[in-house]
Image: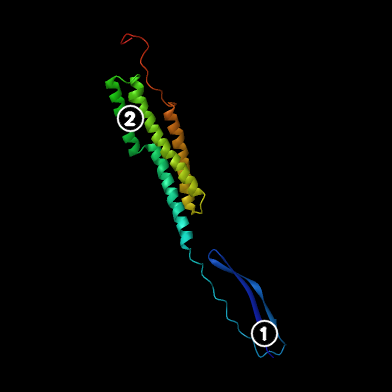
Amino acid sequence: MATTNTDKRDETLTGDEIVTTGSEETEGNAESEGPEETAPAPATAPAPATPAEGATGIAAGAAAVVGAALGLASLTGTWAGTILTQRATLVGQIKVQTGRAGDQIATLYGTPWHTTALVNGAFALLAVIVSAVALSRPRATWAKAVAWGGLALGVLGILVSAGMYFDLFASLPALPKSGRPGS
């Protein structure tokens, strides 16, 4: 007169809840001594993120923020760009004073302008690369949004820098063709 209670359950962790599937089979004869109670299956808590998973999420978030910052820097300019532009201006002034500059306008204005475009373009390219890497990794929703923003700023920075370098927005000033001043 024994009752055998076989409990076959599958517990699957989905998000914050546990889904239990399976069936209970009861075997025995009709003359049982009473209902046999079974202990409920212990609920399992979600496993904590392993250090590798947490580090990947943190790295993707940090890369997204860095990409957005580089994209913004490519549009607003950086300290390095300012220093290199001032250096190009100084080198141009030295060339003009020593008589080694053939075109003074290009030497004093064009070269520093193009230097700024190159530095900002380099920052924009870095923003695109870092943001693309951040988008290729597992990440949180906010990190994905920031990475897309960094990618957009980087692409815009590349376009602006290319326009500056190739003088699409403003051409170099030119001296008038006539030989008389004021004409």
Residue 183 higher or lower than 18, as above or below: above
| Residue pictured at 45% horizontal, 31% vertical | 162
Image coordinates of residue 34 in percent, x first then y, are: 65, 89
Can the viewer see residue 149?
Answer: no
For residue 37, above or below residue 45: below
Q: Is any atom of residue 125 visible in this view?
A: yes
Residue at the spot of label 2: 88
SS of the residue under disc 2: helix
Tally the numbered discs.
2
Q: Residues within 10 Å of mark 1 (few under 14, many from 20)?
A: few
Image mark for residue 4: 1
Q: Is residue 59 above or below residue 172?
A: below
Mark 2 and 1 residues: CB-CB less than 8 Å, in contact? no
Q: Amino acid at mark 2?
A: Ala
C-alpha distance separating marks 2 and 1: 90 Å
The residue closer to the viewer here, 64 or 103, is 103
As rendered, which of 95 and 147 lies closer to the eye?
Answer: 95
Within-10-Å neighbours for mark 2: few <14, some 14–19, many 20+: many
Q: Residue at x 37, y 31 (%)?
A: 115
Q: What's the residue at 67%, 84% (across, down)?
A: 4
Three-letter amino acid code at the position of disc 1: Thr
Mark 1: which secondary structure?
Answer: strand
